[in-house]
Structure formats: structure tokens, C-alpha cells
Amino acid sequence: MKKIIVLTGAGMSAESGIRTFRDSDGLWEEYKIDDVATPNGWRRNPGLVLDFYNQRRRQLLASKPNAGHYALAELEKDFDVQIITQNIDNLHERAGSSQVVHLHGELMKVRSTGPGEEVFDVSPEKPNVNLGDKCPKGYQLRPHIVWFGEAVPEIEKAERMTYDADLFLIIGTSLVVYPAAGLIHNVRPGVPIYLIDPKEVNHIPYDVTVIQKGASEGMKEFRKMLHLN
Ligand code: APR
């Protein structure tokens, strides 16, 4: 079965009401990355960081997958669809996608700050994680997120997946954050690349079929291009 590797970013979840980072109303217009998405920010003011992710977790719990998420899940009927997402939301999984790799971590998980770095699920019934919330071994819990400056444990797996693609589909990312943005260089020559984004993303040094639409409408056009109903 043909393998479609999909790289998604914040734009994938925009139609679910989840803010992107670099659009005009993006998160980085309101928060300083250094304060809420770096190890320094965590050391300086862990309470502010925990609040930032508590807000985003509560927003996620109030959000639902959009038609674009469901269309990607539907594609699994005809292809081996493997998603590499920069998003920390769980909307791909909630829409039914079965193969999802989270490059930047997961909002509904937390991690021990102790040496074992054990990972725990966050219950939707208790979405807030606060100072003093500790793992069973007594270490403070932190968001299970890859912050700027931290290693991206899943990147080698994502590079291998991209190299094996028979088709590479990019949806809703400004392709400015590495190493995720560098994945496109792992696509084998001759493998078709499609990009779905309402804005022009023009710094891609490859022949890309651009669908200049939002995720939901873009996925409808993508399916037509693949001659699916
Ligand atoms: N459908 C598809 N794409 C959209 C939509 C939509 N409805 N709305 C906006 N977009 C596009 C924007 O045009 C932009 O190209 O989504 C992209 C969002 O870009 P960013 O806000 O930069 O998000 P992303 O590329 O995912 O950021 C990468 O940066 O801050 C870090 O860790 C964070 O994972 C994030 C990474």
C-alpha cells in the first residue's frame, strides 16, 4: 500500500479554534517564547510555564477535530498514512488517525523532572498541573513538551519515515522551526510533495504542488487530485 507521510503544524488545528504561533493573532504575539517554552523560562518561573500549558490544555479539551483531521483519518482506507506532527494537541488521534508521531511532545502528558523522566497521562477531569504536583518518586511534574533548545527525540524516526514516503504532504506549518522544517530534505528525489496552506509558503527549494487553502478545504482538493471520491 502506498505510503503517505504527512507533516502537520499549528495550521492543521486552526479550524478547530486552536491558535497558531506566527499568524497575526498567534500565541507568540502574546507570550515571549523564552518565558514559556524554554528550559530557562522553566527555571525562572515554573508557575508561569505551568499556567501557559494549563490554559492550552483547557482550550484543547474544549476543541474538536476539524474536517481536515477527519479527512486525514479517512485517507487510511486507501493509503498507509503516517503523520509527523509538530502539534502537541491530540486532535489527529481523536479524529481516528492511527499512526501519529509527536515531534514536539504532547499536551495531555506530563513528565517527571527526576532522573527517570517518567511520563504520565493528564486526566481530562484534572487538566491543570501545578507547582507541588509530583511524580510518585517525589519530583515536580513538567509539561511533556519539547521546548526550544531541547533535543527532539523523535526526529531520527521522523527522518526515516520521510525517506520511505511515496508521497509527502505538508499541512499548516510555516516551516521555520528546525529540525522539523528540515524533514523535507529527506524526501527522495521524484517523490511528489504537496503543501496545503492558505498563505504562500515560498521558501521551499523543491517542486511542490501547492493547494493554497485551509486544511479542510485543502484536503477535499487533495483527495480529488488523488482521484478519490
Ligand atoms: N489551514 C491550514 N494552514 C493554516 C490555517 C488553516 N486553516 N491557518 C493558518 N495556517 C498556516 C499558516 O499560514 C502558517 O503557515 O499554518 C501555519 C502556522 O505556522 P506557525 O504558526 O509557525 O506554526 P508551526 O509551523 O506549527 O510552528 C512550528 O514552532 O513555536 C513552535 O513548537 C512550536 O510546533 C511549533 C513550531
Image: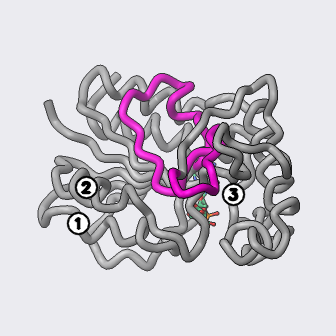
Closer to us: 202 or 29? 29
Which kind of residue does numbered mark 1 sit on? Asn
Characterize the local packing of mark 3: few (<14), some (14-19) or many (20 or more) Cα atoms within 10 angstroms. many
Figure check: 131 above or below 63:
below
Residue at 31% from the left image edge and 40% from the top image edge: 225
SS for callout 1: helix
Numbered mark located on residue 162 in the image: 2
Q: Quadrant of the C terminus?
A: top left
Residue 156 pos. (x, y %): 29, 61
**Residue ID for mark 1:** 186
Alpha carbon separation for disc pair 2 and 3:
24 Å
The answer to whether marks 2 and 1 mark residues whose Cβ atoms lie closer than 8 Å is: yes
**Residue ID for mark 3:** 20
Residue at 79% from the left image edge and 73% from the top image edge: 35
Q: Earlier in the sequence, mark 2 or mark 3?
A: 3
Read off the magenta span: 88-116
Residue at 60% from the left image edge and 66% from the top image edge: 147
Which residue is situated farthest in the front direction here?
A: 137
Characterize the local packing of mark 1: few (<14), some (14-19) or many (20 or more) Cα atoms within 10 angstroms. some
Q: Report whether the residue tagged 2 is closer than 8 Å to ligand 1.
A: no
Q: Is residue 163 left or right of residue 9?
A: left
Which kind of residue does numbered mark 2 sit on? Thr
Residue at 18% from the left image edge and 58% from the top image edge: 163
User: Can see residue 225?
Assistant: yes
Closer to us: 65 or 88? 88
